[in-house]
Image: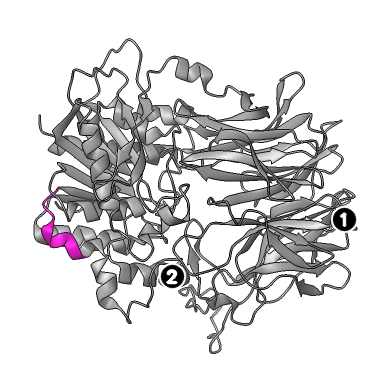
Amino acid sequence: MTRLKWGVVAAILWGAAQSAVPANEATPKFQPQDVFALRFASDPQVRPDGKQVAYVRNGFDVMTDGENKAIWLVDLGSGQETPLVAGPGAYMQPRWSPDGTRLAFVAAVEGEKPQLYVRWMATGTQVKLTTLPQSPRAISWSPDGNSIAFEMFVPDDGLKLGAPLPKPAGAKWADPPNIVTDVIYRFDGRGKLEPGHSHIFVISASGGAPRQVTFGNYEENGPLAWAPDGKSLYYAGNRQVEWQHQVNQDSLQRVSLLDGTITALTPPGPTASLHISPDGSKIAFIGYQDNKRGYQNSQLYLYDVKSQKATSLTQDFDRSVTDPQWSGDHEIYVQYVDHGITKAARVSLDGKRTDVAQGLGDSDEPDRPYSGGAYSVSENGTLAYTDASPERPAELALAKGSSGKQLTRLNELFFASKALGKVAPLPVKSSFDQLPIDAWIVTPPDFDPAKKYPLILEIHGGPFASYGPSFATDMQLYAAAGYVVVYANPRGSTSYGDSFANQIDRAYPGHDYDDLMSVVDTAIAKGFVDADNLFVTGGSGGGALTAWIVGKTGRFRAAVAQKPVINWASEVLTTDLTKYMAVYWFSKMPWEDPQGYWDRSPLSLVGNVTTPTMVVVGDSDYRTPVSEAEQYYQALSLKGVPTALMKVPGASHGGLAARPSQSAEKAEAILGWFERFRKK
């Protein structure tokens, strides 16, 4: 097929997919335009006394095709919801002052860079504290509430070679050459990076000029934690000379606010998400002993300020924990994922773990059901979290004993008038070695088990990630179009422990293929799947597996490889994660083991492909760059396989479905491609 532009492909395939949806239904199904109606909660923040929760309410604007972010307040005594800051723009990162009387937040008002604001809760007065040239992040209140620390990018001039030519007055010349010296010079979602580094700043909570605290050609990484006396800040960073060429070599750092002295407190290694106890005697952080494997469990470490020693509290727990938060001086809360389900747990200082909430949900990528979520806990143990289910996006919830209490109903009225596909577990055993595989099956809203339905296998990316029983727009749109959908966590997925994930260590893609074919076979065995109408799609690692699958079997009628890896040698040398992938996913560099890279590349199997396969990629993708998709499209074209290349304008790897219209059109285009080759 001749390459078509995004708009042309979307228009053609949109119509084909729409024809498959019955009209005049008694209860309407979820449709593409419904994506604009969705609302979801994120970033909950419990007030220190545990009586109120501020959170970010996210929605979409059909006129701007973008996301709206507003900060809302829920009173836990009355249940009353109140908008705090809303309107045109985006309002995010709400953070309470230590006494709970003020709320700091970041606002991106139309036409301005994001700035730091403070709101006095008693009066409703809010003040813009900064006029910054770059966006502030990782904001953190000092213990006395008088100052706020934050991180900000500080640009520099970069390398200049030669003297600039004198330009005549009024002359219009081309832009000067861009000289790159940084190892990471572009990053997905941010584009090409200008020269410079992230540094720490402090500003008075009542306003004034911010003071830069750290300097030099180094990167500081939040979150930021204040010492109880307010005289120093803790963070994660790497100040070794060769830091740009190193991976996972941060250490716990302390910077003095008096003289700027920086002290490394722990040996270099994976260090992130630090949080200090209220009395300042201990620092909780996330790390692990780096063995250079594809997957390694993240552990909860406790650094004792007095003894200067760090100890793991979860060394014997075969799951990764994240986002440690103190509740008082003797309990730490963490988040982890188990069998695709996200949970929050309380960990005592002797390592005893108690689950306090489950079903946390994350709507950062609402098109697919990735595991995730967010929570916040007060000093008295009040825990608020984002709660998701297969029937709705993330809502705000409160942990109550062994269950949760839903606090918001952001989508209740909308979904009351919609018939959704039903999501149910689908237990599977791999044909390769009988390894248990978690999977889920989504049936159409008007499902009749006596009928035969076409099936879509949808594959998650990562590959070290997991799906779970959460709401996802793609799954619902596929189901509404009359397809049974299956998705799974094949070997290599997280949330099943170290051994399960590392079955693909330096062997990906591998027996994931057997796991996924077993998922399809198990669904067919249910009796309501048409084995002559099978389709497959997936994104990122799922795109690589889609291309791998059609190179190994012709059983699928059509396929769509979204933002795939096609050639591991070119991927490793062009991705924004180049120094990570080469070390952790391969034993050697591409020039040292070209055959090893080729044997694991879907491009090596393209000679076997007969399945009509469309390739989708964002034209600003720096994770699996556009050249990966283009290679596969060209190869399929040369072989004579029906194909199309769809580029999504302005979309990054992580933002392929960030704009609601593009999310809906992507799903419709996939359905349209499948309809073209569906056996009637």
Q: Residue at x 10, y 33 (%)?
A: 679
Above or below residue 49? Residue 244 is below
Q: Amino acid at mark 1?
A: Pro
Residues under labels 2 and 1: Cα distance? Answer: 39 Å
Can you name the residue that lies furthest to the top here? 26
The answer to whether residue 227 is left or right of residue 485 is right
The answer to whether residue 49 is left or right of residue 564 is right
Can you name the residue that lies furthest to the bottom here? 162
Q: Which residue is mark 2?
A: 578
Element type at marker 2? helix
Residue 398 placement: quadrant: top right
Residue 478, magenta (yes or no): no
The percent coordinates of residue 389 (x first, y second) are: 49, 29
The percent coordinates of residue 422 (x first, y second) are: 36, 24
Q: Which residue is mark 1?
A: 228
The answer to whether residue 395 is left or right of residue 214 is left
Query: Can residue 100 be seen at all in this image of the molecule?
Result: yes
Query: Can residue 652 be seen at all in this image of the molecule?
Result: no
Lower position in the chain sequence, tag 2 or tag 1: 1
Seen from the viewer's position, the closer of residues 9 and 143 is 143
User: For the residues carrying marks 2 and 1, which lies nearer the camera in this image?
Assistant: 1
Q: Main secondary structure of the magenta part?
A: helix
Q: Residue at x 49, y 56 (%)?
A: 189
Residue 240 placement: quadrant: bottom right
Q: Quadrant of the C terminus?
A: top left
Above or below residue 378? Residue 631 is below
Q: Residue at x 34, y 35 (%)?
A: 427
Q: Residues within 10 Å of mark 2 (few under 14, many from 20)?
A: some
- The segment highlighted magenta reads 604-611
